[in-house]
Amino acid sequence: MGTAQYPVTPETTAIFPEITNIPDLFRTCIQCGVCSGSCPMGEVMEFPPRKAAKMIADGRAEEVLASNTPWLCISCHACQVRCPSQLLIPDGLFPALRSAVMAEGKNLEQDLQKALQNTYLYGNPMGISPRKRTEWTQTAGVPVPIISQLKRPVDVLWVVECYPSFEPRNQEISRKLARILNALGVDYAILGQEERCLGDCEWLAGERGLFEMLIERNIEILNRYQFKEILMTDPHSYRTLLNIYPKLGGNFAVKHLTVFLAERLEQLKPLLKKRVNATVTYHDSCCLGRKTGHYDEPRAVLRAIPGLELAEMIQNRESSLCCGGGASTIYLDRYIQERAKDRLADRRVHQAAATGAETLAVACPFEPSRFEDAVKLTGQEGKLAVRDIIELLAESMELA
Amino acid sequence: MNIAVLTKQVPDLVEGVEIDASGKAVDSDSIRYILSESDDHALEEALLLKERAQARVEVFSLETGEVRDSLYAALAKGADRVVIVATGAETPPSNHTAAKIFASVLQGLSFDLILTGVRAIDDLDGSLGGLLAGYLNLPYVGLVRKVETADGTPMAVVQKEYPGGYAAELEVKLPAVLGIQAAEQPPRYVPVSRLRQVMKTAKVEEKDAAPAEAETVEVVRMFKPEEGGGAAMLSGTPGEVALQIVNVFAERRLVR
């Protein structure tokens, strides 16, 4: 079906399974139910993952496609990391279901449809002109070089991604990161107007053709330049570039910011001059936690900040609770809210407040706005602040 | 039932629009074209009619910008035939001229319904649908949000919007021209893989249109809206904010 240039192998088929491949891909499913039991949306799904896989194997895919199941997976990977048969549930079963729903030509939820159309037209889900991708840099206060203008290799290519480039709350975080990189003397550059969405949400939303289109373009652009490694703050894109792109022909050394900083703690520590006297609880995002296993690096960076005390939520590390916005479900909030009993972000904020912390630290661009909304909705305003790790570092480095 | 959908490309406001050196037109080099939004709704309504009444849907589009992309998308959504109406003109025609062009293309073809968007963002001289109906001597209903047809009757029942949230149901004799305000559902999504497949296999026809000239309006000056001074944010307790508002009103002599 696709037109992409990568080889068709069992591995690429597993990234883009058709619903007809599911019985074969899930032939080792032992129907244990760990997936459904682990799923924070399982109680709301008409057919939780275990049942959905069995129904498809039994030739009853139509019922699953007509149910609420396809659009309720938030891709938190609670199921996938626990599955004893190591089956691809949010990475395989759900994109296949979503692709099949799209192929039926049914209308999608309008926010999701708009985000996909925008990504096709403008390379970002917000529908903002690609020409405005670097506007945030104008008030960064430090130079933010663009690699095509530098015309030389750099140590670090910072792939800023969509939310950190366009969304006001995240733009402020991006400016602070530019100041931090500058203070650390990192030789870095960004892609600028050439940058496009890396496609994680689109892939998991089942929009295979759009993901293929983005991959082709992004691999071509990234291959144009010379750099030692790619730096990213968005864990979704980081995970996709790290684990999925290589299977489709895009091999790049890529690092999440928290890992990049954890490697430079000795250089960083003397710059952390100001005390940040706060009890902080850290939210393990699904892509940085369960999907790529970075539990210690973000905590190590936070612990380096003088005055900062870490407290753990009841669900932490591998058992962390998702904010409820992965796999394009950030565009399905209304759909999910009409069906779910409560919002996962609200549940998570309750957990954060219960630790006694006054700051909820995050390292994912989706989370400041999701958790800040949840803070307001749960009556925690003024009691619990949501801050990106970058903001906490910038405060301690007096770069705010 | 045969349905013609007339579409055109308009400047994409997301990419920004500049005015050219003459000060009378949009700078065509600065813009990217996309399908006019209400034309997209006209296509959607036609596709809904096709699903309900086994209609045949043919899309005709003026040759402007990246017109092929939107025509391939129309095919991927379910249109049966797509045609570029080649005019040879470098700039998009006025609606009076466009109506004449479409009238010459449609003359002699047998369509029961001709659907087009009721308006486009670059309309300067009235609605295309009404002008076209005049040239073709057909009935016209604009601001339509629903179309129903029944087998064997030469009539359609349409819902037309009026200001203030009112709507009327009208019977219209076919063939007729309808200006679509909004389809009964948002325009459907085309997965990119299907779009790319259609681009590889399907055909976009081209039809030369006879040169047409029509009386139209003359643009004297085109200019961007003047920007306001921006908003001021008031802060403080509700009492303090209220006092600041009273002071602002007093300064501007809005209260005594």
Image (tube, rainbow, N blue to C red):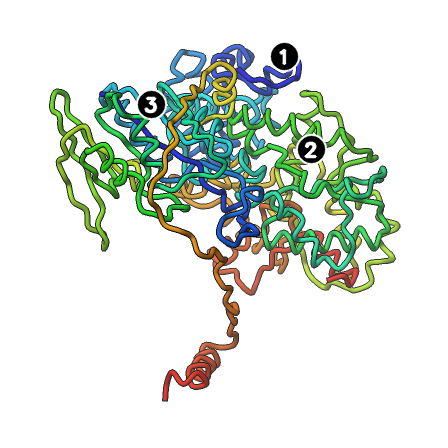
**Are circles 1 and 2 on residues that touch, CB within 8 Å?**
no
Residue found farthest to the bottom: B256
Q: Residue at x 40, y 11 (%)?
A: A59
Q: Which amino acid type is shown beneath numbered disc 1? A: Val
Q: Which residue is mark 1?
A: A8
Q: Can residue A318 be spotted in the picture?
A: no
Tell me the chain of label 3: B
Quarter of the picture holding the C terminus of chain A: bottom right
Relative to B233, say whether A116 is above or below.
Answer: above
Element type where label 2 sits in the image:
loop
Percent of width and height locating residue A249: 71, 21
Q: Residue at x 46, y 45 (%)?
A: A343
In the picture, measured across the screen, residue B65 lies left or right of residue A14, that is left
Percent of width and height locating residue A367: 58, 48
Marking on residue A292: 2
Percent of width and height locating residue B51: 28, 22
Relative to A143, say whether A105 is above or below.
Answer: above
Q: Which residue is mark 3?
A: B58
Q: Residue at x 26, y 43 (%)?
A: B143
Dot 1: few (<14), some (14–19), or many (≥20) neighbours within 10 Å? few
Element type where label 1 sits in the image:
loop
Of B52 and A19, nearer the camera is: B52
Disc 1 versus disc 2: distance between alpha carbons?
25 Å
